[in-house]
Image (spheres, rainbow, N blue to C red):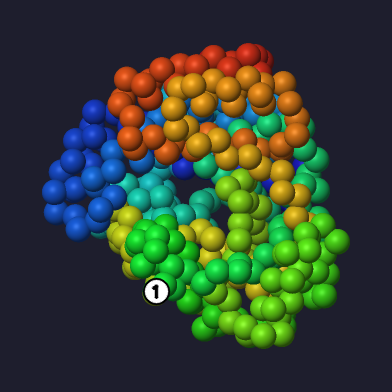
Amino acid sequence: MNEEDKIDFVLPWVDSSDLSWQEEKGKYALNSTSHDTENNTRYRDANTLRYVLRSIEKNCPWYHKIYLITTGHYPRWLDIHHPKIELITHDDIFPDNNDLPVFNVNAIEMNLVNIKGLSEKFVYLNDDTIIWKYLEIDRFFKNNKPVDFFYHGWLPRGRVYKLVRSSDVWVDAILNNIHLINNEVSLGKMSYSQYFHHSYGLKQKISNFLYRFLYKKVFWINHWHHPQPYVKQNLKYVSSIFSKEMKETSRHRFKLNTDITQYLYRYWHLMTGDFEPHNYDDGYVVRMNCFQQMKDILEEIKYGDTFSFVCFNDQMNDISDSEFQEVVAMLEQSLKEKFKQKASFEF
């Protein structure tokens, strides 16, 4: 396979049942001002990793390698010596070991460019997102550019928004990305088709028109929670321009409102017009809110192929750990039925 044809998948993962990891997290949380240390549900494992990896091998058989980023632990069913698997530790990608250990995915994402051997084109995803049906390469890349869409938001997430919705560390981080982009990227980098592609809906086209000819500055960019294609050269360029801000986030062991995120890379390739436009709108986010709701959803999507990606997002802050385990068991059984075949890298 030629280097330019290789496409890797990259995802971070944490084993929250690892006792040494729990001990370190608890020790550093004592001296942290982050509210993230109080949210234990953020680290709960829904046992989806096995099926995320199976879904890549089954539905994207053209992939080159899967890079799994962890603190050093890994599931015992995974053959880390398999040629299709690369286990990457935080030590491998963080230039400054004083920033470790880290419990902040934003900090990890600031160092994706440091993954040795990573293909020029790669897909980044989370361990809760399943590739639900077979996909061709051109769902992610065309003409060696990431397939993406530009949809300027209708609603600014400024002071009024925060008064209504209250402050949110994720929203703040996205706004931090946008602030950096607005200061660096001039208007007019996108082509007409990138603003008004035929796959965009009417509302999307109107909003993009208002941005293009009225707003002049970005106040929000819509996106869905699905696997994100990137080109490594773009990450290198972004890392050189925003090195100060990225190093600062890299130092944050836990999430802070001053963080930036991996979407900075996406916003850059959008605003500079370095992407192939198409809005597939083919992702589905399942909010894991309660047992009965999950049961109904799993039955509904069990054999369907309407969606390319299904994300099982843990939003269950208000239910007990015991009910969470019941939901996980049901989810795992459903995924086991859909993805029966073991991946080549499973023991």
> Image point 45% across, 22% down: which residue?
291
Q: In this view, does 62 lie above or below 208?
A: above
Q: Residue 265 at x, y = what percent?
A: 57, 64
> Image point 36% across, 67% down: which residue?
163
> Image point 54% across, 14% down: which residue?
333
Q: Is residue 327 above or below residue 61?
A: above
Residue at the front extreme, as displayed? 164
Q: Local crowd at mark 1 within 10 Å, few (<14), some, or many (≥20)?
A: few
Q: In which quarter of the image is the N terminus?
A: top right
Residue at the right extreme, as displayed? 198
Q: Can residue 196 be seen in this view?
A: yes
Q: Is residue 239 above or below residue 147?
A: below
Q: Residue 66 at x, y = what percent?
A: 59, 38
Q: Quadrant of residue 209?
A: bottom right
Question: How many numbered marks appear?
Answer: 1
Q: Can residue 97 be seen in this view?
A: no
> Image point 51% across, 26% down: which residue?
293
Q: Residue 191 at x, y = what percent?
A: 80, 75
Q: What residue type is labelled 1?
A: Arg
187 sits left or right of 197 in the view: left
Q: Quadrant of residue 97?
A: bottom left
Q: In which quarter of the image is residue 13?
A: top left
Query: Element at badge 1?
Result: helix
Q: Is residue 28 above or below residue 60?
A: below
11 sits left or right of 41 in the view: right
Q: Residue 142 at x, y = what percent?
A: 81, 55
| Residue to which mark 1 is pinned | 159
